[in-house]
Image (cartoon, rainbow, N blue to C red):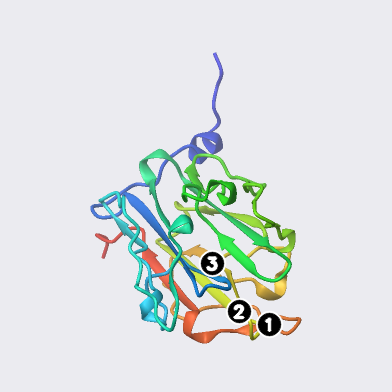
Amino acid sequence: MAVLSLSALGLTAAPALASGDRYVNLHQCVYTNGRFLYANVLSNTPNTSFNTGTNISDTRDTVAQCGRGTGGWRPDSPNVAVQSLDRVRGRFLNLHQCVYTNDRFLYTNVLSNTPNTSFNTGTNLTYTRDTAARCGPGTGGWRLDSPNVAVQSLDLAGGRFLNLHQCVYTNGSSLYTNVLSNTPNTSFNTGTNISNRRDTVAKCGPGTGGWRLDSPNVAVQSLDLAPGAP
């Protein structure tokens, strides 16, 4: 009979859940202005017309909630989705970020279930830490932009708050969204983490190569993994 060590048992134990915190509902809203795309995963950016429904809840969200957009921007339905991740089924939120280029613009996707399947990621919630990003091959002249591709494995038992930092950059003609803290392109990395402290200020790299932060689309959303706790 195989004997499991206490450390192995710990890795396969789901976090204790309280009322209100079973599902991590990640909403991704992607917008087009007819030239390029902008992806947002947060519900609380200053640019409120583009905000999403991302939340922690006892309810599994099934329909993406997206602001209407403004200034000639509209939702780009093939790239819009909500992924509802059940915390009863795992400990690690493996957040995969796949970034694509067509040599002019960048497109960021973090979800595994958009209608645009050639661009989907491996984002999941499981008992195993993912160490390699899983990304669709792209299509229509789009290919992976490796320096901006990564997976961040977040231990939901490691703290009370899931702090999702979103850093959006502009080069004057297009936008690039990053939500991860560990891409090879370190000048664009974020502060996304699990902590017992609620982050209130977005942490973003300075950008480089003519890219600078686009403040209206930058934010941190701090999701309480134990909303019933004192």
C-alpha span from label 3 to label 1: 20 Å
The residue shown at (33%, 63%) is 65
Q: Is residue 194 left or right of residue 213?
A: left
For mark 3, what is the residue?
A: 192
Say few, some or many: other residues with alpha carbon within 10 Å of mark 1 (under 14 / 14 to 19 / 20 or more): some
Give how far across and how far down residue 47 sits, in percent: 41, 82
**Label 1 belongs to which residue?**
211
Q: Are marks 3 and 1 in contact (CB under 8 Å)?
A: no
Residue 137 marker:
none
Front position in the image: 202 or 135: 135
- The residue lying toward the viewer, choosing from 137 and 42, is 137
Image vertical order of residue 45 relative to residue 53, above or below: below
Q: CA distance from mark 2 to mark 3?
A: 16 Å
> Which image quarter holds the C terminus?
bottom left
Residue 98 relative to residue 68: left or right:
right
Q: Nearer the viewer, residue 210 or 194?
A: 210
The answer to the question of whether label 2 and label 1 lie on touching residues, with beta carbons closer than 8 A, is: yes
Q: Point out the tag, 2 or 3, that comes first from the N-terminus.
A: 2
In the rendered view, tell whether residue 164 sits above or below residue 22. below
What's the residue type where badge 3 is placed? Thr
Q: In the image, what residue type sits under mark 1?
A: Trp
Residue 60 lies, in percent from the top left, at 29, 49
Tag nearer the camera, 2 or 3: 2
Q: Is residue 13 left or right of residue 56?
A: right
Which element type, helix, strand or loop, lies under badge 3? loop
Measuring 30% from the left and 52% from the top, which residue is drawn there? 61
Q: Nearer the viewer, mark 3 or mark 1?
A: 1
Mark seen at residue 169:
2
Cα separation between marks 2 and 1 = 6 Å
